[in-house]
Amino acid sequence: MPTQAPPEGVPSTDAFGAWLKDGPASVRERGRAWRPSIGGLRFAFYGRISTEGYQDPVSSRAWQLEAANRVIAGRGQIVAEFFDTGTSRSLPWRKRPQAAALLEAAAGPDREFDAVVVGEFERAFAGGTARAVIETLQSCGVQMWLPEAEGPVDLTEPDHRALLLMLGHQSEREVLRNRSRTSAAMAAQVREQGRNLGGRPPYGYQLVDAGPHPNKVHASWGRRRHRLDVDPVTAPHVRWIFARRLDGWSTAAIARALNERRVPSPGVYDQKRNPHRRHAVWTLRTVAAILANPRYTGRQVWNRQFTDHREAVPGDKRSSLGPVRVWNQRAAWVVSAERTHPALVSDEDFAVVQQVTAVGVPDDGVARRYALTGLLICGVCGRRLGAHWTHGKPGYRCRHGHTSAQPVEGEAPRWVYWPQAMLAGRLLAVDDRLAGLRDTEELASFLKSRDLVIVCGPRTLRIEAAAVEPVANTEPEPPAAPVAVTSATEKPEAVQLALPFAAGGRRRGRWLLSRKGRPVRRNGNTKNPTRSHVKRE
């Protein structure tokens, strides 16, 4: 059959495109067919994708947009698009960049659309947030169209309200089910297979290739498994840390020795994952974390911590006070049955290291007890005083954030120190509320039962109410002069310490008084910050 030439005026390369556009000469239609109307409603399309790294924003936007077009077919056209990338559906619309822009545009006097359409309910809403968003849009004169409703949502209709409740519960059920299945699968992979579930390797190890991915489909995509292996550069330092701890060294002495030897800290050694810690040094917390990590015995350990969102209303992330990492009970940890990587410390040595606790028992066998632990607040910086044994007796001191792991930098305020006997004796002799108390143990019980603390300066003492959560974030009020508690023969210092604590609020701000008397505001972030706020087991 001879080849037909393309129509006149159409290049040969566009022949296929012209054929697609022309279509057949006649179309047989069965039933009633719709045709795009001219004019109609103006729609704004909203879509969302959770993660950009594991999902394709282009394809996800395409299928959501196609689903939205099917809903409004013949009744209008989309004139504006709002698509959030990398945002969780648990976030309210006001905290999503594109959703917030949509709400702002809807409230504007010159908006370009009459209604909003989404491609899928779960992509736009979570739980019971849909009704609040729809009410906000309706107050601006904007409709919400859903595929599940096959058109606009009318909150005056009982069926539509019931539909929103069902869809909200269904989305929550999907989240809980996926979370439960994922957690159970990860626990089984660690316990039964010893799988490495990702994350940065512990200091002393490095990730190496462990063969193709166990899932055949993933393996066909080129994905590989990884396991932990000894890092020849940092592993000797980990062994040295455990050896010194077994010799009786304190964590401060170990950290100080590492800093003096200029051993790169974990943050400095792994610059790719720690670009914000270029000047980090070894700290007590870093050494303690290494000594407490059971992965150095050669086993995989998972679920040591979880993220607490501190929700005022459980399940409602809009009421969150901010996430913190919290330690799980040891019984909840998932540990592999077999060793999966080379051990840097034996099981016996690791167990011995864990027995070194904060309860000091000296050579004479007498345990050191501190009755006022946690009840003393520093009047200079707002920290709690730490227990300190000196001259055979208990005492308390505050070094304003300084540790023996590193030297004092620049001009520093004077440390606050109080022997326990002197502190209790002065308070019992002066404060009428403490009349009848005989010793430090009874003083501690009195303070705890009434939720009181003692604010301590170098020569000043004051009993105040314990800290509470603030009702608003406000700057602390100017410091007020404390009442000096001194003996009759002792002359108090001319410059007294200030207490810059706002009434009724937690003592968050730290004001340091230098030796020259100049108040200097400190936010707690020194050259070597420890930004991980965790609650240990």
Image: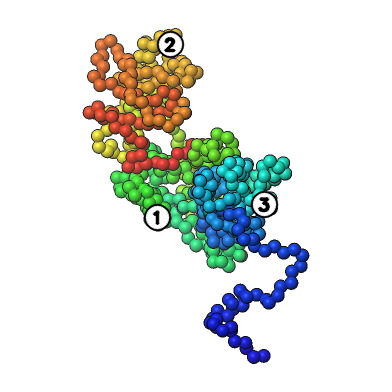
Quadrant location of the N terminus in the rendered image: bottom right
Q: Residue furthest front?
A: 38
Q: Which residue is mark 3?
A: 151
| Residue at point 33%, 30% (across, down) | 511
Whether residue 258 is situated above or below residue 66 in the rendered picture:
above
What label does residue 272 carry, if any?
Answer: 1
Q: Residues within 10 Å of mark 3 (few under 14, many from 20)?
A: some
Q: Nearer the viewer, residue 274 or 407?
A: 274
Q: Secondary structure at mark 3?
A: strand
Q: Which residue is mark 2?
A: 433
| Residue at point 35%, 14% (across, down) | 426
Residue type, numbered disc 3: Gly
* Mark nearer the N terminus (2 vs 1): 1
- The CA span between labels 2 and 1 is 58 Å
| Residue at point 56%, 59% (across, down) | 61
Q: Secondary structure at mark 1?
A: loop
* Mark nearer the N terminus (2 vs 3): 3
Residue type, numbered disc 1: Lys
Q: Is residue 153 left or right of residue 411?
A: right
Whether residue 72 is situated above or below residue 106 in the rendered picture:
below
Whether residue 449 is situated above or below residue 4 in the rendered picture:
above
Q: Nearer the viewer, mark 2 or mark 3?
A: 3
Residue type, numbered disc 2: Arg
